[in-house]
Image: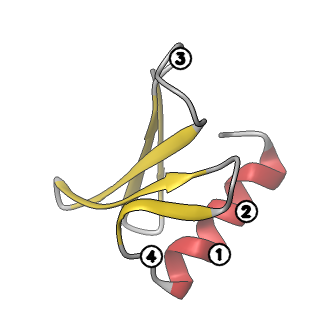
Amino acid sequence: MGKVRRGGYVFVTWKGDHSPRHVHVYRDGVLIVKWDLDHGQPMTGKITRRVRLLLEELEREGAL
């Protein structure tokens, strides 16, 4: 499991989790969005511009 805290959000991935490759994004312990990293779209929930920018930053850094 990988967990990264950034901008008030917690981004969680699990090694060996089901396809497609995705990240769970939480704020204050509540799931905000489950984001499909392979296709760049939400699997559940809605994404905000702020979360989208943080996801792009984390992917550039290789943290996801």
Give the number of the disc on residue 47: 4
Identify the residue under disc 3. 15
Give the image location of residue 24, x and y in percent. 39, 47
In the displayed structure image, the side of residue 23 where residue 41 appears, left or right: right
| Residue for point 74% across, 51% down | 59
| Label 3 element class | loop
Work out how far the residue at label 3 is from the one at label 1, CA to CA, in angstroms: 23 Å
Q: Which residue is mark 1?
A: 53
**Which amino acid type is marked by label 1?**
Leu
- Cα–Cα gap, marks 4 and 2: 15 Å
Quadrant in which the C terminus is drawn: top right
Q: Secondary structure at mark 4?
A: loop
Tags 2 and 1 touching, CB below 8 Å: yes
Q: CA distance from mark 2 to mark 1?
A: 6 Å
Which circle's residue, 3 or 1, is located before the other in the chain? 3
Camera-side residue: 51 or 41? 41
Residue named by callout 2: 57
